[in-house]
Amino acid sequence: MIQYQKGWQSKLVEEIQTYSDIEEKAKRISDKTVMYKKFLSSRFLISDKVDYVIDNIGSEIELSNLDISQQGFSISISGKDAIDFTNLIVRYLEDGLVSEIVINSASLDKSENIYKVMLRGNFK
């Protein structure tokens, strides 16, 4: 009877040792989950701001470059009429998400009759 119990105990010890590997894997998964949740909570959500900047541009202006961060954006745009750029700036400022617009540069390419403008905006 003692031999049987000893054999049964050895078998159970081996089975428990296989579970220790599972425990280590579960701990690693738990640590990864905690790190992922920290990453998600610390990241900046700017997709709404990207949509806002692009949607206000309209069809009359062509976007060449867009740099965006949580604090603001910078765009390079071109178009055929100067009033389109004025309307864009007014749209940005009227919607209330942008607190300031700065025109970094503006030029007119006479050969193609196209205005090229670089703007920078700060979000509220």
Image (cartoon, helix red, strand yellow):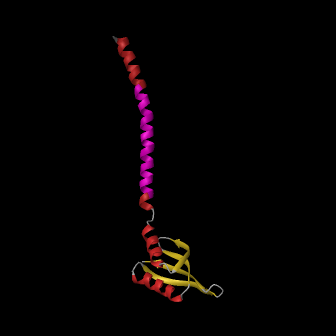
Q: Residue at x 46, y 86 (%)?
A: 87
| 60 is within the stretch colored magenta | no
Left or right of residue 65, residue 94 in this image: left
Left or right of residue 92, residue 5 in this image: left
Provide the major secondary structure of the magenta segment. helix
Q: Residue at x 40, y 21 (%)?
A: 11
Q: Which residue is at the front of the view, 101 or 35?
A: 101
Q: Which residue is at the front of the view, 80 or 34?
A: 80
Seen as rendered, the residue at the extreme left is 1
Q: Which residue is at the front of the view, 11 or 86?
A: 86
**Residue 90 percent location from the top left of the image:** 44, 85
- Relative height, residue 110 to residue 67 (above, below): below
* Number of numbered discs visible in the structure rendering: 0
Quadrant where the C terminus lies? bottom left
Left or right of residue 109, residue 10 in this image: left
**Residue 79 percent location from the top left of the image:** 55, 82
| 23 is within the stretch colored magenta | yes
What span is colored magenta in the figure? 15-39
Seen as rendered, the residue at the extreme right is 111
Q: Residue at x 41, y 32 (%)?
A: 19
The image quarter containing residue 44 is bottom left
Quadrant where the N terminus lies? top left
**Residue 52 percent location from the top left of the image:** 43, 74
**Residue 34 percent location from the top left of the image:** 42, 51
Q: Residue at x 50, y 85 (%)?
A: 84
